[in-house]
Image (cartoon, helix red, strand yellow):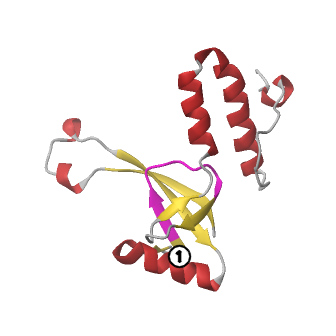
C-alpha cells in the first residue's frame, strides 16, 4: 500500500493545552493519504483501530498521521503484530551514516537528495541514486 503526503500541521499535545502559549511545545505532524488494493485498505483500517481516520473531503480516503516525514511518496506495510510501518527507511539509514561518517556527509546528502527527487517524480527507489552537482544546482537570482 502506498502513501502520498498531502499536508503538514503543527499540533499542541492535549496535555499541554492548559499551559500558556509560550510554554507549549507543538509537534509537527505529517498527513499521508493511503492508497492500495481493497484487501490492503481493509488491513490498514484494522491495523489503525481507534486511530483510523479518513479525509474530510467527499473522497473519504484513509489517512495516516505521523511525526515522521517519509517524503512525498512512501510505501507502507503492516507488520505481523498489526502495526503500520514504512517499508522504505533508506533516508533514515543514510542520516545515521552521515552521523557516523561526518567526512562523507556531502556524498550522503547527495544520495538523500537523489532519493527525494526520485520520489517526487513518482519513480521507485530501490538503490542509491547518482546525483551530480548540476542536478542539485539552484538558480541564484
Q: Quadrant of the N terminus?
A: bottom right
Residue in front for this viewpoint, 111 or 65: 111
Quarter of image, res 24: top left
Residue 112 shown left or right of residue 63 in the figure: right
Residue in front for this viewpoint, 116 or 99: 99
| Element marked by disc 1 | loop
The residue identified by callout 1 is 57
Magenta includes 52?
no
Residue in front for this viewpoint, 35 or 89: 89
Q: Residue at x 76, y 39 (%)?
A: 128
Q: Residue at x 58, y 69 (%)?
A: 34
Q: Residue at x 29, y 50 (%)?
A: 12
Residue in front for this viewpoint, 12 or 45: 45
Is residue 59 in sight in this rendering?
no
Query: Which range of residues does the magenta coloring cover?
Result: 63-74
Residue 10 shown left or right of residue 111 in the figure: left
Residue 115 shown left or right of residue 84 in the figure: right
Residue 88 shown left or right of residue 26 in the figure: right
Above or below, 38 against 84 in this view is below
Q: Quadrant of the C terminus?
A: top right
Q: Residue at x 86, y 26 (%)?
A: 134
**Residue 54 location, x and y as percent?**
48, 75
Amino acid at each position: 500500500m502506498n502513501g502520498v503526503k498531502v499536508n503538514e500541521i503543527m499540533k499542541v499535545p492535549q496535555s499541554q493545552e492548559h499551559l500558556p502559549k509560550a510554554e507549549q511545545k507543538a509537534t509537527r505532524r505529517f498527513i499521508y493519504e493511503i492508497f492500495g488494493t481493497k484487501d490492503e485498505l481493509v488491513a490498514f483500517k484494522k491495523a489503525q483501530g481507534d486511530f483510523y481516520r479518513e479525509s474530510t473531503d467527499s473522497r473519504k480516503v484513509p489517512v495516516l498521521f505521523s511525526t515522521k516525514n517519509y517524503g512525498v511518496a512512501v510505501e507502507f506495510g503492516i507488520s505481523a503484530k498489526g502495526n503500520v510501518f514504512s517499508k522504505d527507511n533508506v533516508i533514515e539509514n543514510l542520516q545515521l551514516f552521515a552521523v557516523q561518517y561526518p567526512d562523507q556527509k556531502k556524498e550522503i546528502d547527495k544520495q538523500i537528495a537523489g532519493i527525494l527527487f526520485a520520489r517526487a517524480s513518482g519513480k521507485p527507489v530501490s538503490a542509491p541514486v547518482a546525483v551530480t552537482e548540476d542536478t542539485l544546482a539552484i538558480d541564484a537570482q
